[in-house]
Amino acid sequence: MDKERIDEALELLWLLNEEDLHELERFKLSSEDDDIESLIDILKNEGLIAIHGDKIQFTDQGASKAKSLIRRLRLAERLFSDVFEMRGDSVITDACKMEHTLSVETSKKLAKFIEFVESCAEGDRPTWLKGFDYYFKTGKRPKCKARQLKKRNTQKEI
């Protein structure tokens, strides 16, 4: 349970830092944790944050861990919204669940997959991904030109 609490706190602190908000009180008020004081103690004891006066900041270790969490979160969000074209609350909810479980290796492959999809020369959405969209909506495989050509060539050889 502490791992997820820690992850959520690091994610929150990262997002606040992106908005240039470093006040400890802002962090406490923004957190949904039921026992924020004990969580802050855990973060300090784990060497993930430091408190200086009324400011909260990452240690190097905390920043590294938070950066990795945010990367996994954003990769999952992009997979759902950009590749699967999902919308709504489920994108954020499911991406948040995935961020806690994706390994470094899987994250790297996911990033490359998204990069691959975006770099397809076919335009806005590759044909094979449109085929998946069709299959998802109808439960039927779309007609595949390559499969049809292969079938014709096989029949000619016989």
Image (cartoon, rainbow, N blue to C red):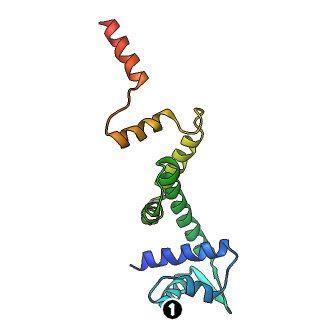
What percent of the width, then of the height, locates residue 29?
A: 56, 87
What percent of the width, then of the height, locates residue 30?
A: 56, 82
What percent of the width, then of the height, locates residue 32?
A: 48, 82
Task: Give the side of residue 130 with respect to residue 119, left or right.
Answer: left
Tell me if residue 130 comes above or below residue 66 in the rendering.
above
Farthest-out residue, left:
158
**What residue is rendered at 48% in x and 56% in y?**
87
Tell me if residue 114 comes above or below residue 156 in the rendering.
below
Farthest-out residue, right:
20
Q: Nearer the viewer, residue 85 or 152?
A: 85
Q: Amino acid at mark 1?
A: Glu
> Which image quadrant for residue 28?
bottom right
Looking at the rendering, in which quadrant would you find the N terminus? bottom left
**What residue is rendered at 51% in x and 61% in y?**
72
Tell me if residue 1 comes above or below residue 142 in the rendering.
below
> Which image quadrant for residue 65?
bottom right
Q: Nearer the viewer, residue 63 or 33?
A: 33
What percent of the width, then of the height, locates residue 88?
A: 47, 60
Task: Give the side of residue 79 with respect to residue 134, left or right.
Answer: right
Q: Secondary structure at mark 1?
A: helix
| Mark 1, residue position | 37
> Which image quadrant for residue 63?
bottom right
